[in-house]
Amino acid sequence: MEYSGKLPTSNVNVSQRSPLQELCVLLGGLLGLCLVFYLCLGWAVDYSIQHISPEEENDLYALMKFPTGEEGEASDQTLAVQSLLQALQKCAPLPYQVSIDVSRSKQVNAAAFPGGHILIFSGLLDQMGSENELVFVLGHELGHFKHRDHLRSLGRGLVLWVMSLFLLGPDNDVGNFLFTALGVAERTHSRQQESAADEYALEVLNCHYGHVGGSTRFFEKLRDTNQTPEILKYYSTHPSDQKRIDNLNALAIQKNFRVDAVKPWVVSTK
Amino acid sequence: MEFITFIILMMLGYGFGTWAERRHYKSIEEREMKYQKLPTIGLKHPLPQPGRVVKAQLAVGNVVISVDYFKRFLASLRNIFGGRVSSYETLVDRARREATLRMKESCPGATQIINVRLETASLSKNTRKGSIGSIEVFAYGTAITYK
């Protein structure tokens, strides 16, 4: 028998299906599944946070490592902010023993942590042109406590993190991708929360001073210094500054709130 | 930022991966055509052939092929749902054929290669970030030259 070599006409060992098509099917399926899981767990979070007592929140605060304010003796600025917050609690009855810390940082921000703990950065305090502006910021954080947003975002973040960890393991390509993709949708949720907290802050401001002067001053400053391109706004957690100003003005008119002169805020940082 | 890096890596992986694969297949097909008269068989005894054996030598061919970012991502998605990992099929197919071709090329003038075996090894078992998923295929046999 003589050998005569012959090559096969087609390659049966390789699928002819387009890899791009496969990618779309798999990725679509996975994203869909994750979204369903995430929404279900998100609802579970929303439901369960109503049943967490302030004491349990305090335990949670002690358990998790949240950033704290300055160490040692409190400065005049910290004491002034603390007494202002005490005075505000009459206008914002909450089931919490609300406390505030000042962190020495250039960041212009404030945060609400479980158990009624507020952390305010000195960068934000330096921006305050009047006491009314500060009361608005504090009212905003109290609004987060009122609507339990601090627990909600914590719970949802936890859900996302645990899901990615269980499904894909730590530091996985697919996990990181999903994290970014779902994170964008999550921020809309938090933008609604911000607007609700703004409304609450306006009520607190009106209750404390009898008028709402200075409520939009801080956002106007932010708007003038920080020009975010329109395209990036979808990715930012807070609604755009102009939108917030418009909302607040509309609300003040709707509720017949007066606008009067503001009280100056001058406290030395030493 | 991470997302943009990911998209760029995926596009690079797909673009260059497809280009390299197409080029490789073209080369494989041309060389297979060229060497198709040289039989490679798994039997321990040569095919009946007129003449006498003048030379018998070890013939080896070895190749390492790496997977691209796009294929690896697709395979890790496949890992979740199960099924044919078609993105790795071309990788293994190319590696086997290339190793066999290199083995043939290592013994010019041979009449046939007998007792051919293929060994496969994966060079990095964990495809964590930073490590490379590649496959090694090693082909070996006994090249016999008749006169």
Image (cartoon, coloured by chain):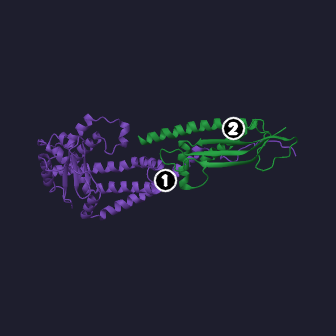
Chain seen in green: B
The colour chain A appears in is purple
Q: Give the SS element for disc 2.
A: helix
* Kind of residue at disc 1: Gly
Q: What's the amino acid at mark 2? A: Ile
Indicate the position of residue A97 as horizontal and vertical percent values. 19, 59
Q: Is residue B139 left or right of residue A204?
A: right
Label 2 Cα neighbours within 10 Å, binned few <14 / some 14-19 / many ≥20: some
* Depth order, front residue of A227/B51: B51
Using residue A41 as the reference point, say whether residue A227 is left or right of it: left
Q: Give the quarter of the figure containing the C terminus of chain A.
A: top left
Secondary element type, mark 1: helix
Q: Which residue is mark 1?
A: A32
On what subunit does the disc labeled 1 rest?
A
The answer to whether residue A43 is left or right of residue B44 is left
Q: x%, y% of residue B133?
A: 55, 46
Residue B72 place in picture, x, y as percent = 54, 46
- The disc at residue A162 is none
Toward the viewer: B92 or B72?
B92
Determine the CA span between mark 1 and mark 2.
41 Å
